[in-house]
């Protein structure tokens, strides 16, 4: 009898015994509504042996990617039922961030709930916030924010400014304190500014790693390198990477099963042309790895050229964007919102990284009150 196989996949992260959804199904990086998943015949035969897929973080997955997998499984299994009749278990919190779709007025139009087959889904609900189980009042506050209720932070969470936020997250200016601590921001620019401020205060000798950049698909030397170096794009390391031994960093690209996008590491030293880092959390905590420079090529609608950057795929994570923090549990959380929220789930994801009220601190332009944007369609 053929042994039944159950495979677990996730949308953005890779763990031991898990496979990233884009890697498993060979989903194209640049995707549209007619995209197809291309693979060898032997790989298709292997996928046919799998009876059940568990797909985590489904709230952030674009409907075009999910539909591409639907068409793939229907094709290889010779069955016109959704996903070729294969059992699909989708896991995710629809109160969290939705898929990113450039220039979309509402990202909810591209979430899993808009797929044509979604009406056949049998929903199962989890009702207990295990992360905040030790602080029921905080769990209730987080749940209300997730449901779209107006958010007014408790007095114990509010600090006056960014300097006060840094002092609250790292008391006495001790940036070497144990535990996972980060300040969460709306934008990459805000995170970079806070990272530079803290890096200047962090003890140790500063080192800098500069990228090798090139502007492709344009005429000659139309764009000077000084301008190309200033390009800062989500998912792409910056031209200048500040390095100090003992400082925390986040991996930006999948480098190995242990070093995947979103992994937190501690930088130790340069070894030849690599950086020696130690994994700071998860089941691989304490393992040492060596990270080489990677080549990243990206074409963005805001750039009149294709950017090719060769750089170490990591960035300081004293501060990070809310999007990068999704899926993480932090010991101490600082939230800095420099403008009203504009995306579904932005505030909910930020505050739900903390286990207790006393572990979360907030700075916003409206004081204790926060504009809580929520798309009712996806709840």
Image (cartoon, grey):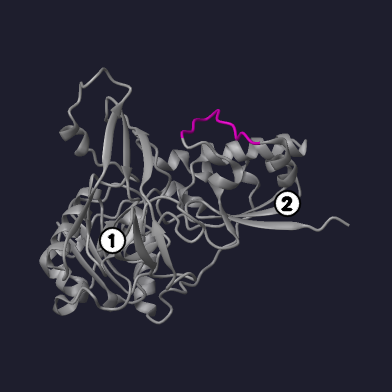
Pointer 2 residue: 50
Q: Quadrant of residue 75?
A: top right
Residue 210 is inside the magenta segment: no
Q: Quadrant of residue 138?
A: bottom left
Q: Position of residue 330 (x, y in %)?
A: 35, 70
What is the span of residues highlighted in magenta in the rendered image? 30-39
**Callout 1: SS:** loop
Nearest-to-viewer mark from 1 and 2: 1
307 left or right of 225? Answer: right
Quadrant into which the N terminus falls: bottom right
Q: Is residue 43 at least partly visible in the picture?
A: yes
Q: Nearer the viewer, residue 38 or 70?
A: 38
310 left or right of 68? Answer: left
Pointer 1 residue: 317
**Callout 2: SS:** strand
Q: Position of residue 110 (x, y in %)?
A: 46, 39
Estimate the spatial distance between the alpha carbons at disc 1 and disc 2, rounded to whole Å.
38 Å
314 left or right of 55? Answer: left
């Amino acid at each position: 009898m053929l042994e039944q196989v159950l495979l677990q996949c996730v949308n953005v992260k890779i763990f031991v015994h898990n496979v990233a959804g884009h890697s498993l199904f060979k989903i194209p990086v640049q995707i549209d509504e007619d995209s197809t998943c291309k693979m060898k015949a032997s790989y298709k035969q292997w996928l046919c042996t799998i009876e059940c897929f568990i797909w985590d973080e489904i709230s952030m997955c674009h409907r075009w990617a999910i539909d591409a997998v639907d068409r793939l499984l229907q094709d290889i299994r010779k069955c016109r039922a959704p996903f070729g009749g294969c059992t699909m278990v989708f896991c995710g919190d629809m109160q969290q961030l939705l898929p990113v779709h450039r220039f979309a007025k509402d990202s909810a139009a591209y979430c899993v709930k808009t797929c044509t087959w979604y009406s056949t889904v049998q929903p199962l609900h989890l009702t207990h916030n295990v992360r905040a189980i030790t602080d029921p009042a905080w769990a209730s506050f987080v749940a209300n924010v997730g449901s779209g209720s107006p958010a007014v932070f408790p007095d114990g969470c509010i600090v006056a400014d960014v300097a006060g936020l840094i002092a609250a997250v790292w008391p006495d200016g001790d940036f070497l304190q144990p535990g996972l601590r980060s300040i969460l921001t709306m934008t990459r620019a805000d995170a970079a500014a806070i990272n530079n401020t803290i890096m200047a205060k962090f003890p140790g000798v500063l080192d800098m790693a500069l990228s090798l950049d090139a502007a492709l698909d344009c005429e000659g030397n139309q764009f000077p390198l000084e301008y190309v170096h200033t390009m800062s794009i989500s998912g792409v390391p910056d031209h200048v990477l500040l390095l100090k031994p003992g400082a925390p960093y986040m991996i930006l690209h999948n480098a190995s099963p242990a070093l995947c996008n979103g992994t937190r590491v501690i930088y130790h030293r340069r070894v030849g042309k690599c950086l020696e880092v130690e994994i700071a959390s998860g089941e691989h905590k304490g393992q040492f790895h060596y990270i080489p420079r990677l080549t990243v090529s990206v074409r963005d609608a805001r750039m009149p050229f294709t950017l090719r950057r060769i750089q170490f795929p990591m960035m300081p994570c004293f501060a990070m964007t809310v999007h990068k923090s999704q899926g993480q549990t932090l010991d101490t959380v600082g939230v800095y919102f420099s403008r009203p929220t504009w995306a579904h789930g932005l505030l909910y994801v930020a505050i739900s990284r903390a286990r207790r009220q006393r572990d979360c601190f907030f700075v916003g332009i409206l004081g204790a009150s926060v504009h809580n944007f929520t798309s009712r369609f996806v709840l």
